Image (spheres, grey):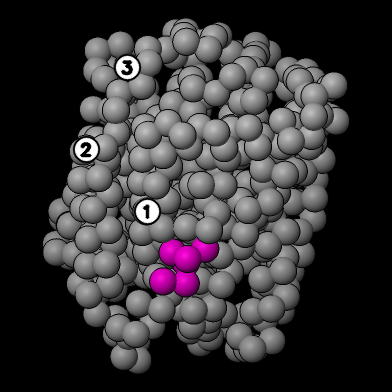
Amino acid sequence: MFGSVPGRLALMMFLQYFGLAAVIVPLTRYLQTAADAGGLNFRPTHVSLVYATFAMGAAVTPLVVGVLADRWFAVEKVIAGTHALMAALVGAAAAWCDTHDGATADPADAVAPLFLLVLGYAVGTQITLTLAVVISFRNLPAGGGTFWYVRLVGTFGWVVAGFVTGWALNPISPQPLYLAAATSAALAAFALVLPHTPPKGHGRPLREVLGLPAVKMFRDRSFLVFALVLLVCNLMNQFYAQFVSPFLKDLGVELDLGRYGRLAPEVVMTLAQVCEIGCMAATPWLLRRMKLKHLMLIGLGGLLLRNALLYLANVPAVVAVALPMHGWGYAFYGLLGSYFVDREAPPHLRAGAQSLVTFLGSGPAVLVGNFLAGGVVEANRAGTVTDWPTVWAVPLIGYALALVAFALLFREPPEPGAHR
């Protein structure tokens, strides 16, 4: 299987998301855990600063992707070189944490160097996430839904990483960071056997290579509405991304299975990705039978339901419905957004257009969302006790407004194939 083009791209997606999940999922709890329990004892605002690096990385992605992958180098070589640097940076971050956690934890000393190391890793992450989509769209057939099946293997990698970091490793330690470093090193080598995908920007003005003409897409009302709703959703999603793990811990969502290990929050959270895999597997079938707008609306509805249940804090409902709705919303709004943009952009600008989506989905809105979430949590925390209903009320209102705006203002785009 992995000798075929779809097979190699699927393995790339698996490694990409496996390594990212090894960082994203356990890091928030490790950073906030008290020193006597082996953590770094960071405040919520410190956590927000570290996680803001991924938004900062998204801000430079359009420039880097447009110049490197559309003008100078083959996409697979950019992926390989970027992952080699990512392996070195996240490995250094793990070693730094090793000397500053537990009894020696001192956030004042640890936060600035860790921020810089994670920032470098985050820039690489945003570049490679964008290029993983670019190389897939350029090398897979437009019809048949092949991309969705390739991409769902990436989500399966996220699920596997959740089990590995939550069950086989100690999530309150630098071990997941070392795992991410090894994964990036493996992907740096594997990227060299990905399909050769040369740049398409030779002989074109730099402004085109950077994707600047894609800004004209904002003249279309549907694209503008999609973009603004994406901004709101990703701003509000930072509440979930940073604080759902400690929230689950406070709810007591952790089960000791004796000799079989622990069902830690990091493992329970993979329910979101299991649901996401099912949604992506069904997407090609659904796209043939439903309007794109309706699918995106049910994605937004899932995000609204997720936050309503987090607000209510009913443990069975949170585990059985709210966590799966996270994957539901991501698949039916976030991933369909990438499909929508690829469908609307001219072929020679698709890399730039996808980097624009990365910027919109992971740039300034996420940066603001990081600090907003951290500030709200810190303002509603007394000692080790957090007023979670007040915290979850903020994104609940935000998602409600986003859903209403999309329902009223988004128009159904042209049928697929208009630019193929």
Residue under the image location 61 percent in, 38 percent down: 355
Kind of residue indicated by mark 3: Leu
Location of residue 220 in the rendering, given as x and y in whole percent from the top left corner:
42, 31
The residue that disc 3 covers is: 287
Residue 39 quadrant: bottom right
- Give the number of the mark in front: 1 or 3: 1
Residue count near mark 3 (Cα–Cα under 10 Å), binned few <14, some 14–19, many ≥20: some
* Element on which disc 1 rests: helix
The residue range painted magenta reads 367-372
Kind of residue indicated by mark 2: Ala
Kind of residue indicated by mark 1: Val
In the picture, measured across the screen, residue 45 lies left or right of residue 328, that is right
Location of residue 109 in the rendering, given as x and y in whole percent from the top left corner:
69, 86
In the picture, measured across the screen, residue 374 lies left or right of residue 7, that is left
In the picture, measured across the screen, residue 93 lies left or right of residue 414, that is right
- Give the number of the mark in front: 3 or 2: 2
Residue under the image location 31 percent in, 90 percent down: 382
Q: Please, is residue 273 above or below residue 317 in the view?
A: above
The residue that disc 2 covers is: 407
Instruction: Point out which mark residue 232 bears.
Output: 1
Q: Please, is residue 162 above or below residue 376 in the view?
A: above
Residue 308 shows in the view: yes
In front here: 268 or 107? 107
